[in-house]
Image (spheres, rainbow, N blue to C red):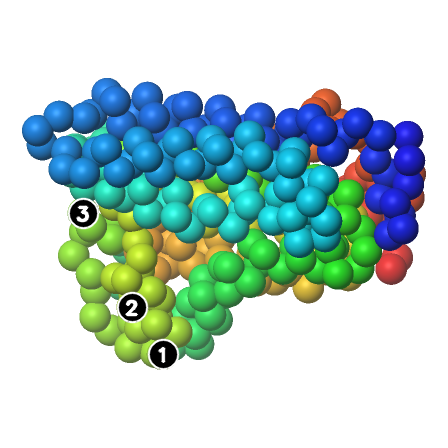
Amino acid sequence: MGVTDNGERMTDNSRYKLQAVDIATLAYALAATIAVVMYAGDDLLGWEWLLAANGLLAVCALLAPRGRRAGKVGRFFADWYAVLLLPGLYGEVGVLNVDIGYHHDLTIQRLELAVFGSQVSYRWIREVPSVWLSWVLHSCYLAYFFILYASPAGLWLMGKKDAARHTIFAIAVTFFICYVAFLFYPVAGPRYLFELTHNAATEVWPARAAQWVLDLGDSWGAAFPSSHVAGSVVATGMALFYSRRLGLLLAPFTAGLILAVVYGQFHYAVDALSGLLLAAAVLAVMQRRLILEPAPASAGSVVGVLGTSA
């Protein structure tokens, strides 16, 4: 095992092998290709482009080991490509689901009633049209991409590049699981199934900005589980694991986002709950080091980090 100039631990031949993130990306490309083939036909226009996109994703994964041997720039993109491509993969999910046009919202709405006793995403913003609460929660929702990318980027800039790679892997796997669920069990969500409300809470600037962002880039059928919740919680949990200060910076935004997806009628409450459960499972696996190389000895667990001083 060798150590690079920036303190990274790396075996001599690791640059020549597919890494865990590459294998996960290939698995997702296969699953997405299966979904396209299952739904391809006269009613699915442009399915060939979706297959080509999945093929290019697989090529990126297969070329990643070569990129890691091509200098700093090549290594950066080889390490980051999985999370950099997530917005595009999210768009592909929406394209496929819109063309198919069926959803499982009735089942999720029944589950919502069984778990919470009512349709929380419909009632909350109507019964509590708070201007200040809407400002806070929708602002946290708008911080979604900041949460997602600040976690690995912050670790990377601190020189903790192994930690950043672990975080990238955890985030990528979380989204791949969500996207597979969207492809094979599409749920449109309350934003599409319920009439949108208009009151003081929806007129504040962050609420209008959130709706504008969703109008531009939302993917139909991508509600259950909430990838916003799952991805943000995993990003924040990994940050807490490796850098308490970074994790505590992201934690309030993440807590607000979890509530915002329901208050803003973007997700059912069970979508948020399932996203939390998925994030907890991913973080538990990462902490037990069942997949990746051991973390630095000074890292400790998320629980241990929370209980120690900075």
Quadrant position of the N terminus in the picture? top right
Residue 7 versus residue 283: which sits nearer the camera? 7
Task: Report the residue marked by disc 3.
Answer: 193
- Tell me which numbered mark, 1 or 3, is placed earlier along the sequence: 3
Residue 212 versus residue 84: which sits nearer the camera? 84
**Is residue 94 toward the left or the right of residue 75 in the image?**
left
SS under mark 2: helix
Task: Report the residue marked by disc 1.
Answer: 205
Kindly identify the residue that appears in the image at 89 percent across and 51 percent down. 5
> Which amino acid, mark 3?
Leu
SS under mark 1: helix
Kindly identify the residue that appears in the image at 49 percent across and 24 percent down. 27
Quarter where residue 300 is shown: top right
Q: Residues within 10 Å of mark 1 (few under 14, many from 20)?
A: some
Kindly identify the residue that appears in the image at 77 percent across and 49 percent down. 161
> Which amino acid, mark 1?
Trp
Quarter where residue 9 is shown: top right
SS under mark 3: helix
**Is residue 181 toward the left or the right of residue 17 in the image?**
left
Q: Real-space Cα distance between discs 2 and 1?
A: 10 Å
**Is residue 164 toward the left or the right of residue 194 in the image?**
right
Task: Report the residue marked by disc 2.
Answer: 212
